[in-house]
């Protein structure tokens, strides 16, 4: 099977999100009234910040019964191929222990679907899950490393397979309830 036909679960990856703070004053803005001292910076409200158990519950709920619908690119050396549409249907995501999770999914390539169950590591960048794969050998496919970040209803990442790699990105769409 060609390297450019690898699934998210076999070639998942991470992309770091960029944040724009539109409509906010610059961080270095001066106090407009010199007689009043500047208010101290507030720390995050621990009541409104979800704990790790709640983050993991939300992650399980969001990804169980969803579709990753998007595109991926392939780069080999200096050659960059045009993005190709892809789709992964994730039936179930379950925490095994610590950072280890099991993903039960279907990977669609053209009109063919392949069932796949794969163990993956999920790390957290604050409240953002990062699906991590390090040098996992998948029989018949090869060895892969990747990072995929989930942010709201979007995913983005990078993948590596030997000297070939690329990006993947798209939407996380909930499947309709039966």
Image: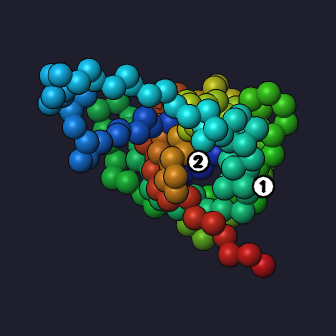
Upstream in sequence: badge 1 or badge 2: 2
104 with respect to 133 (left or right)? right
Q: Is residue 53 visible?
A: yes
| Residue at x 74% of width, y 29% of height | 99
* Secondary element at tag 2: helix
Dividing the picture into quadrants, the one containing residue 62 is bottom right
| Percent coordinates x, y for residue 175 in the rendering | 66, 70
> Residue 8's mark?
2
Q: Residues within 10 Å of mark 2 (few under 14, many from 20)?
A: many
| Percent coordinates x, y for residue 173 in the rendering | 58, 64
| Residue at x 33% of width, y 25% of height | 39
User: Residue under circle 1?
Assistant: 92
| Residue at x 68% of width, y 47% of height | 59
> Residue 142's mark?
none
User: Can you tell which of label 1 and label 2 is closer to the viewer?
Assistant: 1
* Secondary element at tag 1: strand
The C terminus lies in which quarter of the figure?
bottom right
100 with respect to 50 (left or right)? right
In this figure, what is the number of numbered marks?
2
């Amino acid at each position: 099977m060609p390297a450019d036909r690898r699934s998210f679960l076999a070639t998942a990856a991470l992309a770091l999100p960029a944040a724009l703070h539109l409509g906010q004053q610059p961080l270095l803005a001066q106090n407009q009234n010199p007689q009043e001292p500047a208010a101290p910076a507030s720390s995050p409200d621990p009541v409104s910040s979800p704990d790790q158990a709640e983050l993991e519950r939300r992650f399980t709920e969001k990804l169980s019964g969803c579709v990753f619908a998007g595109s991926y690119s392939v780069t080999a050396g200096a050659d960059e191929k045009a993005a190709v549409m892809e789709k992964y249907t994730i039936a179930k995501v379950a925490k095994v222990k610590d950072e280890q999770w099991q993903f039960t999914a279907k990977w669609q390539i053209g009109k063919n679907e392949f069932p796949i169950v794969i163990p993956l590591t999920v790390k957290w960048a604050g409240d953002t899950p990062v699906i991590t794969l390090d040098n996992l050998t998948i029989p018949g496919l090869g060895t892969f490393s990747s990072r995929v970040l989930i942010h709201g209803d979007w995913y983005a990442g990078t993948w590596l397979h030997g000297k070939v790699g690329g990006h993947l990105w798209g939407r996380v769409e909930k499947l309709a309830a039966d």
